[in-house]
Amino acid sequence: MSDSFAAMWDAVHDIGRNPDTGGYNRFVWNDADQTMREWFAGEAANRGLDLYVDRNGNQWAWWGDPAAGDALVLGSHLDSVPEGGAYDGPLGVLSSYAALDSLRTKGFRPDRPIAVVNFVDEEGSRFGISCAGSRLLTGGLDPERARALRDRDGRTMAEVLRRAGREPGELGRDDELLGRIGCFVELHVEQGHDLVDRGHAVGLGSEIWPHGRFRFDFTGEANHAGTTRMEDRRDPMLTYAMTALAANKRARLTGGEARATFGRIEVEPGGTNAVPSRVQAWLDARASEQSMLRELVETVTRLATERAGRDDTSVTMVAESASPPVRFDRALASRLAGRLGGVPVIPTAAGHDAGVLSAAGIPTAMLFVRNPTGISHSPEEFAERDDCLAGVAALAACVEEFAGGAT
Ligand code: GLV
Ligand code: MN
Ligand code: MN
């Protein structure tokens, strides 16, 4: 098990990695993402698993006949955020393959089909919608809307899909495939400190906070940075700046129950010596309760609008994606907790394909692996190798628990 994990880790280590920063840039359908997909297909072939690429581009490596139904699905994603860490996504896919390897070495034969899945475009780094592959699969993202989404170079998803040799018209909900999934278990690096604080290598997920992405368009008037008197400006950067501060303050006022982040802005025309004409800014907001999330976003939008009135600018807000609260399947979790013995059960404020599948009614569980830095979406994200192997062992135990079988 440790050899197979180590070999896979080494094989993907340099793919899409910025050697100067150690950060990963694997964005859906870019060269690095394609290389990761080739790697996934190669690993399936090495194990004699049947590779299936669904209409939305998600990759499935099947052990057993998918048509038999009630499959146990393991996996995660292989794409990254800009300058992301090595573990968010790939750890779950590699661990799934490694768990199957350890069971096959013991002669395990499952009594239901098993698949390892690589969900395409989980981070939404290129087209802005997180979990696009699983949302399309489950019908949570309208295919027409998806095809029209544009990346930062102005290319639509449809164009990018065609360039990648895919047929954009195929995007959409896939009832046949969904009907074959009995349950889904996603292993993921932890993106906080909980497991460190509790002194456990592995934990089980209880729930995902509701969250969403909200685009704010601030509009003003471009003008000269030197000759325009301060009182004559219509500067949307000021309106944006106040909005970012207000979002931070509002989230902090909840006493730890909400998060608000502006992690991306685009400024036009983007000249150092020009008052901007437009600022686009994306708010990522999350909260422990749906009502609190709604109130947070409404308040930030209201404060932005009021400030725009004072700045003589304007602002509009568009909700680009919304993820409802998710409570993972209690029966699955309690069986897994019994099997794994004494593992902590922890909530997360991070989004996952597991949340999308769960929201679509598929019994779903998550396993988390301790991250000593507590940092994620950054090259500082980390997991000790022994903890990774504990995660693999937990996944293997999960397969034994849910896919019975003979050894
Ligand atoms: C995914 O990593 C998210 O929570 O944004
Ligand atoms: Mn992530
Ligand atoms: Mn992830």
Image (tube, rainbow, N blue to C red):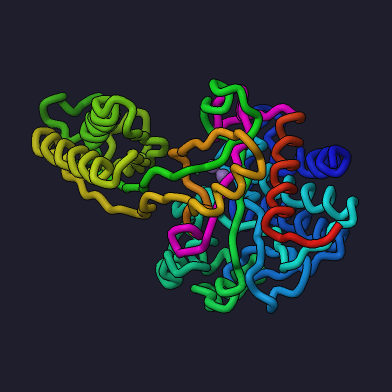
Q: Is residue 331 visible?
A: yes
Between residue 273 and residue 115, name the one nearer to us.
115
> Which image quarter: residue 201?
top right
Between residue 188 and residue 41, name the one nearer to us.
188
> Which quadrant is the C terminus positioned in?
bottom right
Q: Position of residue 285 (x, y in %)?
A: 34, 40
> Which image quarter: residue 40?
bottom right
Residue in view at x 71 percent, y 60 percent: 403
Q: Is 361 a magenta residue?
A: yes
Number of on-image labels: 0
Which quadrant of the render holds ligand 2?
A: top right
Secondary structure mainly formed by the magenta segment: loop
Where does the magenta region start and end? Answer: 357-384
> Which quadrant is the N terminus positioned in?
top right
Q: Is residue 84 visible?
A: no
Between residue 142 and residue 164, name the one nearer to us.
142
Q: Is residue 99 above or below residue 23?
A: below
Q: Is residue 92 above or below residue 119?
A: above
Residue in view at x 21 percent, y 49 percent: 316
